[in-house]
Image (tube, rainbow, N blue to C red):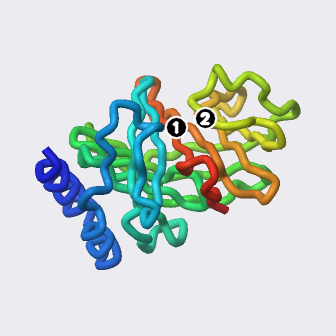
Amino acid sequence: MRSSALAAVAAGLVLAACSPTMRAGLQTLQGAWPQASSVRDAPLDHRLVYLLVTHQGREALMVWSGDEPGPLGPTRVWVGADGVVLRTHQGRMVGVSEPTRSWRVVAQAPVPGLPQGEQQTVDLQPGYRLGLQQTVVRMPLPTPLSEPSTLAFHGPVTGLQWEEENVMSVSARSSLQVGLLARNAQGQVVYGERCLTPEWCLSWQPWPLDRPGQR
């Protein structure tokens, strides 16, 4: 089972055009995938860096395999035992590739007159929906979240600063919340979630809890 998992990871990395750093990281993945029934209780290899990812209530651990250049700057690449590849930039998810679908931010630029807004260009598969334009506005939440039961976040919420991500409509008269982000007192991202489509929502956080987040 482990060999088939590593084969799936390798296939995912090839499809993602892996860099030499990523290929070197792949060599460390043997034995990295916990087999315990509870993902969060699984023993970890402390030489590796993990990300806990949740999708539709199902949890999985992904392993950092290296950084690569990206349109937004250096991008951290995470691989899963099921062949999924996830990319983050400064703690935010900027890409995910699954066997049957993918989403990736390929460009990003400031929006004139909207300091907290960014114009994102996104490629989405299936359907060859390439170069999709969307305006994302990030706003701090005035009141810190106090009900972690509504989130996939595992850990104390005290002292965290939260912000939400909204996609503006074409008319800019309304918006749809698509994401959430939490930072600790050091400004590190310790939790994030993003809905790529109405049916495709992911959350992620550094794992274990005592591992520093990303700036």
Amino acid identity at mark 1: Ser
Pinpoint residue 183: horizontal percent, then vertical percent: 73, 49
Q: Looking at this view, is 100 or 119 the one in front?
A: 100
User: Which percent across, then down, holds residue 166?
Assistant: 66, 35
At x 46% / y 40%, what residue is drawn? 53
Indicate the secondary structure of the residue bearing disc 1.
strand
User: Which residue appears farthest toward the bottom when viewing the image?
Assistant: 20
Give the amino acid type for the residue marked by disc 2 in the picture: His
Please, which residue is most extreme toward the right here?
142
Quarter of the image where one finds residue 173: top right
From the viewer's perspective, tell me whether residue 78 is left or right of residue 125.
right
Q: Is residue 167 visible?
A: no
Measured from the top left, where is residue 138 in percent x and y?
72, 44
The residue furthest front is 43
Please tell me which residue is depicted at 81% across the width and 37% down the height of the picture: 158
On the question of residue 79 being in view, the answer is yes
CA gap between label 2 and label 1 equals 11 Å
> Residue 207 location in percent, x, y?
53, 49
Q: Which quarter of the figure is the C terminus placed in?
A: bottom right
On residue 203, the disc is 1
For the N terminus, the image quarter is: top left
Residue holding disc 2: 154
Q: Earlier in the sequence, mark 2 or mark 1?
A: 2
Towards the viewer: 145 or 131: 145
